[in-house]
Structure formats: structure tokens, C-alpha cells
Amino acid sequence: MPLTISRKVAQRLRRELVIWLTTVRADGMPQPTPVWFLWDGETFLMYPKPNARKLRNLAHDSRVALNLNCDEWGSEVVVFTGEASLDEAAPPVNRNPPYMRKYREGIKQIDMTPESMASDYSVAIRVKPTRVRQE
């Protein structure tokens, strides 16, 4: 069953470019990392590099947290928790139209092309959230 999120959170998920993905290392140390993401209404999709630490962490423990930045007063907190898995069926970055609409300019800003982005960030992670905290 999909989570119920507020209209405001849904707008933020469409608009915001970065979400913090927290994985856990094998020694138990949490590892928060800012990542680009795509929210489809039920799951988050991210594309890390194949040698990213987050992938090694997920191989050890698939539980994750995702959070948006809060405002300057510590309000507008949004934290999702859930399970992450590799998504071998996800299209590559350059063949994912919603992802390209959201990040085409960002890809240009980091001096990449959609093709080089797809080559370097060639793994897809899908996160299925099971809980959300929205304040």
C-alpha cells in the first residue's frame, strides 16, 4: 500500500533536486550522501556509480533513510525509511524521460552529457519507502 504524503511534500519531491540517502556501513556507521532522485509516487530511483560505497553498504543492509533538507528554522522535516534494492529493469539515465526532464540542466552543469552520465552512473537503486515522517 502506498504511503500517504501531503500535497506539499509531493510538490517538494517533484521540485527538489537533492535528497539525502543514508545507508549503513558494515561496521554500523551511518553514511548520509546527497543524491539526485526521481520520485514516481511510490518509489525513489537513484543512479550511483558502480563503485559507490552506498552499493557496498546496501549489499550489507538494504534498510535506508531518505530525507529532504529542512528549512533554516528546522521545520519542514521529511524523512522516509524503507528498503533499497538494485533495479536492473530501470532504464539508463539517458533513456529515462522523467529523469532527463528533471536533471538535463544539472547534467550540463557538471560538464557531462546524458550519454556520459548514463555510462558513469550506470547502476539503478530503487527505494520502496515503508514509513514517512512529515512535519
Image (cartoon, grey):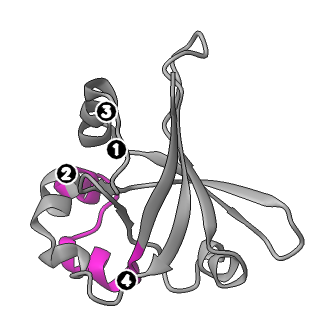
Which is in the foreground here, disc 3 or disc 1? 3
**49 lies above or below 106:** below
Q: Identify which residue is drawn at 30% across, 57% down.
A: 42
How many other residues sit within 10 Å of disc 2, few (<14), some (14-19) or many (≥20)? some
Q: CA distance from mark 2 to mark 4?
A: 20 Å
Tell me the amino acid under the disc marked 1: Leu
Tell me if residue 47 comes above or below residue 16 in the rendering.
below
What residue does disc 1 label? 17
| Type of amino acid at the residue the image marks with label 2 | Lys
Q: Crowdedness of circle 1 by 10 Å Cα count: few (<14), some, many (20+)?
A: some
**Mark 2 falls on what kind of element?**
helix
105 vs 62, left or right, is left
- Quadrant position of the N terminus in the picture: bottom left
- The kind of secondary structure element at disc 4 is loop
Task: Tell which circle, 3 or 1, labels the residue nearer the N-terminal end.
Answer: 3
Query: Is 24 rendered above or below residue 116?
Result: above
Residue at the (59%, 79%) spot, across then down = 55
Q: Are marks 1 and 2 in contact (CB under 8 Å)?
A: yes
Q: Which residues are magenta?
A: 104-125
Q: Is residue 43 magenta?
A: no
What's the CA distance linking mark 4 and mark 1?
Answer: 21 Å
Report the Cα–Cα distance between label 2 and label 3.
13 Å
Q: Decide: marks 2, 4 in contact (CB < 8 A)?
A: no
SS of the residue under disc 1? loop
Which residue is denoted by mark 2 in the rendering? Answer: 102
Point out the residue furthest to the right here.
Answer: 27
Which residue is the site of mark 4?
87
